[in-house]
Image: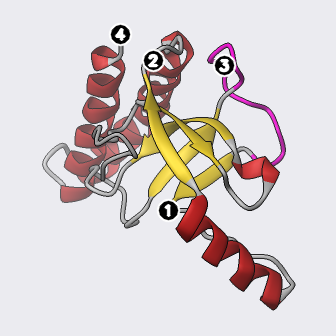
Amino acid sequence: MLDKNGKEMVTGCVVEIKNAYFKTDNGLYFVEKSPEELGWLGSDYCLLKLKRNGQLSTAKKNICFWPIMSFVSDRMKSIEANAWNKEHATIEVRTDIDRQYIKEYFKEEAKRLDPMIEHMKYNFGEDHPETIKQIKLRDHRMEVSGSIQ
C-alpha cells in the first residue's frame, strides 16, 4: 500500500497518521507487520505508536491498524468515526525520525524466537514445517532490523 505521497509502506518504516476521528489515533507509528509479511495473516498494517524521539510509546492505546477502523460501544459513533477516517485520515511515510529504537525492537523480537525454535527442534526435528516457519520468521525479523538505517 502507498502513503498519501505515493511512497510504499513496508515493515520497519515510520509513518504519521493525521486527521483521524479520535485524537489518540493521530501520531507517529512504525509498521510492525504488513500484509505481505511472513507469519502475518491480516490484510491490514499493524502499527505501533512512537514517541517524538523515536522510542516506543508506553501509552495504553499504542496499537493501530491501517486502514483505521474504530470499534466503540456506541454503534452510531463507530459508524461516524469509520466514515470520517475513510474520508479524512491520512498516512505519510516519515524519513526524518531516528529509527534506532525500531532496529533494536526487531532484533529483540528475533531473539525471543530462539527458545521456541530450540524447543521445536528438540520435539519435532529441524525439518518439521513449523520449525522451518519459525526459523524463517526469525530470519525475516533480523533482515528487517538489518535493513533499517
Residue 98 in percent (x, y) is at: 53, 11
Q: What residue sits right under mark 3 in the picture?
A: 55
Q: Earlier in the sequence, mark 4 or mark 2?
A: 2
Tell me where the magenta segment starts and ends, as one range. Answer: 51-61
Disc 4 residue type (three-letter): Gln
| CA distance for labels 4 and 2 | 8 Å
Say which of marks 1 and 3 sits in front. Answer: 1
Q: What residue sits right under mark 2 in the picture?
A: 103
Task: Name the residue at 41% across, 29% down.
Answer: 110
Disc 3 residue type (three-letter): Gln
Say whether residue 78 is left or right of residue 106: right
Q: What residue sits right under mark 1 in the picture?
A: 67
| CA distance for labels 1 and 2 | 24 Å
| CA distance for labels 3 and 2 | 11 Å
Say which of marks 4 and 1 sits in front. Answer: 1
Residue 100 in percent (x, y) is at: 50, 10
| CA distance for labels 4 and 1 | 26 Å
Q: Is residue 55 magenta?
A: yes
Disc 2 residue type (three-letter): Lys
Tag on residue 149?
Answer: 4
Residue farthest left in this picture: 127
Disc 1 residue type (three-letter): Pro
Q: Earlier in the sequence, mark 3 or mark 4?
A: 3
Q: Is residue 4 magenta?
A: no
For the residues labelled 4 and 1, say whether their Cβ atoms are less than 8 Å apart: no
Q: Earlier in the sequence, mark 1 or mark 2?
A: 1
Q: Is residue 123 above or below residue 80?
A: above
Say whether residue 34 is left or right of residue 19: left
Task: Name the residue at 65% across, 70% down.
Answer: 84
> In the picture, residue 68 is in which quadrant?
bottom right
| Circle 2: element type | helix
